[in-house]
Image (tube, helix red, strand yellow):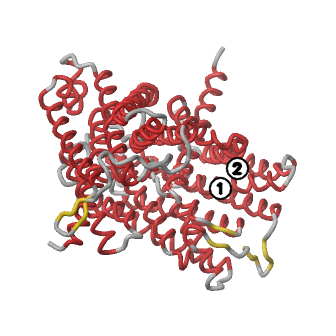
Amino acid sequence: MASSRTAGLAALAAVVALLPLALVNNYHYEVAILVGLNAIVCVGLNLLIGYAGQISLGHAGFFGLGAYGSAILTARYGWPPLAALLAATLAVALLALAIGRPILRLRGHYLAMATLGMGVIISIVITTEDRYTGGPDGMSVPPLTLAGVALTGERPWYWVVGVLLVLAVWLARNLIDSPHGRALRALHGSEVAAEVGGIDSARHKVRVFVISAVYAAVAGSLAAHYAGFITPAKVTFFHSIELVTMVVFGGMASTFGAVVGAAVLTTLPQALTVFKEYEMVVFGGVMMLTMIFMPKGLVPTLAALAARLGKAP
Amino acid sequence: MSAQFLQFLLAGLTIGAIYALVALGFSIIYNASQVINFAQGEFVMVGGMCTVWLGNAGWPLPAAIAAAVLLAALLGLALERFAVEPARGASVVTLIIITIGASILLRGLATLVWDKKIHALKPFSGEAPIQIGGATLLPQSLWVLGVTLVVVLLLSWFFGRTLLGKALLATSHNRLAAQLVGISVRRVLLVAFSLSAALGAVAGILIAPITFTAWDVGVMLGLKGFAAAILGGMGSGPGAVVGGLALGIIEAMGAGYLSSAYKDALAFVIILAVLFFMPNGLLGRRSVDRV
């Protein structure tokens, strides 16, 4: 078990380290950075959806709160960016803690609807309070500074996001292999049975909800600083759906599946900008076909296929 | 009763009737198949956009309306046959993503087949506002309320008195038992989806003269119709109607007396409140889970 865990992590680190050899221009780097940021959110979201078996259709809300929190504190109040990031993330964690308990008492489509509602409310508040947030047009964000040095340019950001992604995956894998992670998998299987076995399912569900929210908020803050700009488009229901699709497409209950899903579904629209008009049709089609024919997601389906081929005489 | 209150009430009832129709569509599909059809709002959009397009192409209004409703019904059929049926037995998350994918696909097709502009449909019987007790009412609102009433009555006749309608109800109560008495569940599902799609299309056509129509009107209308269905109790027909009207009125009152900027948020705040305190909605049955 431990060796496969470190093997996967080492593979990811190798990919991050060697990918720049294949990236030719700034645009490629930009796509890679976007993939990395989405992947961080997806790794956290996968803990909630894949391992704990819950669902959230509102995680773009946490992403947006992290982004706008950093943006407002640095741009309007002159906070140092790292302090702003920590403060925004803390605020999101507290919000997730407060909402988590009542929301996670719900199941199935009720839970989906509640998280959807939460996400939409956050999105509407952000769009309406334009005195702070710049409204529908968004607002500009000063660059991230580390010890007084501003972080600008594609290449430095690539390394920052790459390292953080590996860190995020490592933390997630640690969590999954811990008693907390096993408790999550138990309550995914059957909440009642897990409770009978002594697991406080509410506490675990809220904890993983908060963790996934923190992942999203950190990624949001970074995304805002990287782009130098943030708009409410990143806080919409549609973005929440994109995130869930990345997780489910890549493979639920597979951390690397979440990364793969983020990679594929972030680069797909970029590759499709040539066919800008068909983007929605293709995206919707991909979502439907994947869920109908590969309901377990890409990575687990491929893994199962590989296992079967390995067993064939 | 002040004129302003009456104005808000009438506006609320009008949009509430639309929410009720959309909510009925959600409930019918949910009852038959346990699926939440996130593409329901897109049927509303198809109804309005198709009617506008055919109208502009020279079709007389009644023909355009009939064709639009028929198109929506066919799309509903296709959705069930090609997207929901192959994934039967899949988890809740999977089915939600499938229907959301379908809604994105339909929106994309709408931008390709039609366009991304906002369109107006001509009101059915003129634009001269009617004065009632100090408040003004558009003639189109009367159409909305009247047609909704007729539709609700037709549906209760359908479910209560026809064999097909009773088969739908039976399937919603217990699918296995329905199959055992010879009901074709496949056919019931197809009917449920196309009926819901038709309801959505009717709603879209009715409201298009008032709120205009475009490729993306389905998103908010669908979500609010879903909210109304949950408010009234998911799976309950009368609940869908009550929930829709209630949501419309609360929204209009909130926009009028509190803040019109947060009008849309109000629906979702209500949803959260209902889900936290009354998950079965106003009229829903208390559901029991098997362990």
The answer to whether the residues at label 2 and label 1 have Cβ atoms under 8 Å apart is: yes
SS label for mark 2:
helix
- Subunit bearing disc 1: A
Residue tagged 1: A170
Q: In this view, does A212 lie above or below B67?
A: below
- Residue A140: image quadrant is bottom right
At numbered mark 1, what does the secondary structure look like: helix, strand or loop? Answer: helix
Left or right placement of residue A194 versus residue B102 in this view: left
Q: On screen, A283 above or below A13?
A: above
In depth, the one of B77 and A142 nearer the eye is B77
Disc number for residue A2: none
Position in image of residue A130 (x %, y %): 53, 75
Q: Is residue A55 left or right of residue A300?
A: left
Q: In which quarter of the image is the N terminus of chain A?
A: top right
Q: Which residue lies furthest to the top in this view?
A: A313
Q: Residue at x 41, y 70 (%)?
A: B261
What x and y, as percent, mark residue A71?
62, 74
Residue nearest the observer in this picture, B171 or A296: B171
- Which residue sits at x=35%, y=38%? B35
Quadrant housing residue B200: top left
Q: Are callouts 2 and 1 both on one chain?
A: yes
Asked if one can make out residue A251 in the rendered structure from this viewpoint, the answer is no
Pinpoint residue A127: horizontal percent, then vertical percent.
51, 68
The foreground one among A213 and B231 is B231
Mark 1 is on which residue type?
A: Trp
Tell me the residue at 62%/26% (across/down): A305
Q: Name the residue under label 2.
A: A9
